[in-house]
Image (cartoon, grey):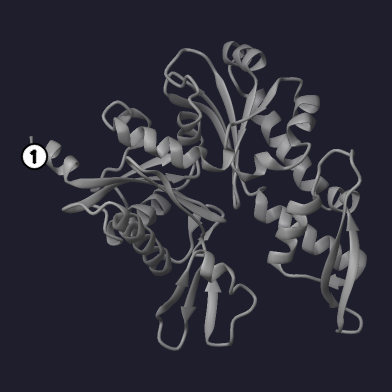
């Protein structure tokens, strides 16, 4: 009885805590926040100067005493206090849209295969940020729920969720993960590949934001339409500003090794998948979600290399947040897909 009253008088919030972006779903309103996972901190006072879009604009442009940091690295919390502040800011922003009497119930998406210590960090950060109840779900499972894959049925579904810091590969059947793999080849790795390539081939030093812009402008994993982009950076020989023209084939060469690693990882998961489920996957195909799903030519390349149909989820960037929203609609029904958090068994911080 009290639980029903609590639920009516409090908000339900779903959070996709990503390395690159954090999305917030508010029950009854849909996705209300989609901001970069960046926080600007004043190192003299320890105070938070800006969060999200405002903080990202400061990356690489701050004075000495202000540091723009990413508190989530490779999908896990690297700076607890800053993550707590970021979550408090985002939860507070969502709560302003729909004011309720009690503190919110929160579902947080995390990468598959994270440790108990990392689960504890997410749980504590969300609790400290103002959540009344915290539920944690693996991102590939949340993405599968968000794009309405038949996770409860006795058929195998293969989902590849390519985020900013990590890629989650998971085979799902009967409401559970049959096989999964988490790897550090994702959006940020491609950015660092581009930075290294321009450094080696063009003797040009660029920042992370420029690499991201180049990737979005011309990155493609299969040759097709010729594209090029002007890239400005610092000449490593003279130390002066310089501009170079970079083509899609340059970027293809830069990210080739990472893309090969991604394909090998998917093959590894398929090689250990039970034959009955593998036959389902061959028929039903692979579904791509996350920002990496938008990389030009990736679905076609995977289809050629893996010999199975490949589909891109509708609105792949929001799949995990939408999945968290579906879970919040009926949390009892999805209890078995949530990570079991036994407060007594979690390791102390």
Residue 200, placed above or below residue 66: above
Residue under the point 65% across and 20% down: 285
Q: Is residue 84 left or right of residue 5?
A: right
Indicate the position of residue 135 as horizontal and vertical percent values.
32, 43
Label 1 CA crowd tier, 10 Å (few <14, some 14–19, many 20+) = few
Residue found farthest to the left = 1
Residue 242 vs residue 181, the one in the foreground: 242
Q: For mark 1, what is the residue?
A: 2
Residue at image position (73%, 32%) is: 299
Q: Give how far across and how far down residue 225 sits, in percent.
A: 89, 41
State the image coordinates of residue 7 (x, y, percent, origin top left): 19, 41
Horizontal side of 100 relative to 224 (left or right) equals left
As drawn, is 185 to the left or to the right of 247? left
Quarter of the image with the C terminus in it: bottom left
Q: Quadrant of the N terminus?
A: top left
Residue 208 in which image quadrant: bottom right
Q: Circle 1 — which element?
A: helix
- The percent coordinates of residue 95 (x first, y second) are 29, 55
* Residue 291 as seen in the image, left or right of residue 345: right
- Identify the residue at horizontal 34%, vertical 55% (top origin): 94
Q: How many marks?
A: 1
Question: Observer-nearest residue: 152 or 58?
Answer: 58
Above or below: residue 67 compared with residue 169: below
Please give the name of the residue rendered at 32% of the width and 40% of the height, measured from the top-left corner. Answer: 28
């Amino acid at each position: 009885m009290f639980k029903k009253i609590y639920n009516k008088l409090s908000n339900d919030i779903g959070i996709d805590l990503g390395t690159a972006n954090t999305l917030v779903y508010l029950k009854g309103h849909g996705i209300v926040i989609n901001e970069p996972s960046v926080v600007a901190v004043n190192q003299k006072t320890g105070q938070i100067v800006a969060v999200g879009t405002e903080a990202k604009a400061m990356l690489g442009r701050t004075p000495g005493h202000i540091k723009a940091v990413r508190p989530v690295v490779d999908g896990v919390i690297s700076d607890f206090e800053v993550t707590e502040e970021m979550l408090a800011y985002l939860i507070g922003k969502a709560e302003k849209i729909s004011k309720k009497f009690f503190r919110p119930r929160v579902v947080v998406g995390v990468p598959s295969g994270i440790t108990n210590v990392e689960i504890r960090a997410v749980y504590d950060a969300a609790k400290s940020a103002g959540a009344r109840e915290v539920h944690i779900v693996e991102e590939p499972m949340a993405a599968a729920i968000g794009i309405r894959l038949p996770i409860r049925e006795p058929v195998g579904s293969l989902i590849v969720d390519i985020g900013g810091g990590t890629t989650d590969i998971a085979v799902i059947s009967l409401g559970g993960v049959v096989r999964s793999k988490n790897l550090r080849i994702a959006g940020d790795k491609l950015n660092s590949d581009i930075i290294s390539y321009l450094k080696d081939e063009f003797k040009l030093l660029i920042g992370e934001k420029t690499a991201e812009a180049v990737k979005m402008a011309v990155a493609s994993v299969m040759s097709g339409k010729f594209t090029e982009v002007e890239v400005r950076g610092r000449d490593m020989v003279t130390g002066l500003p310089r501009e170079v023209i970079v083509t899609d084939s340059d970027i293809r060469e830069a990210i080739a090794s990472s893309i090969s690693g991604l394909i090998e990882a998917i093959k590894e998961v398929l090689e250990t998948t039970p034959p009955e489920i593998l036959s389902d996957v061959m028929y039903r195909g692979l579904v791509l979600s996350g920002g990496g799903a938008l990389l030009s030519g990736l679905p076609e390349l995977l289809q050629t290399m893996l010999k199975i149909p490949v589909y891109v989820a509708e609105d792949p960037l929001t799949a995990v947040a939408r999945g968290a929203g579906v879970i919040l609609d009926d949390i009892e029904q999805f209890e078995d897909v949530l990570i079991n958090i036994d407060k007594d068994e979690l390791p102390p911080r």
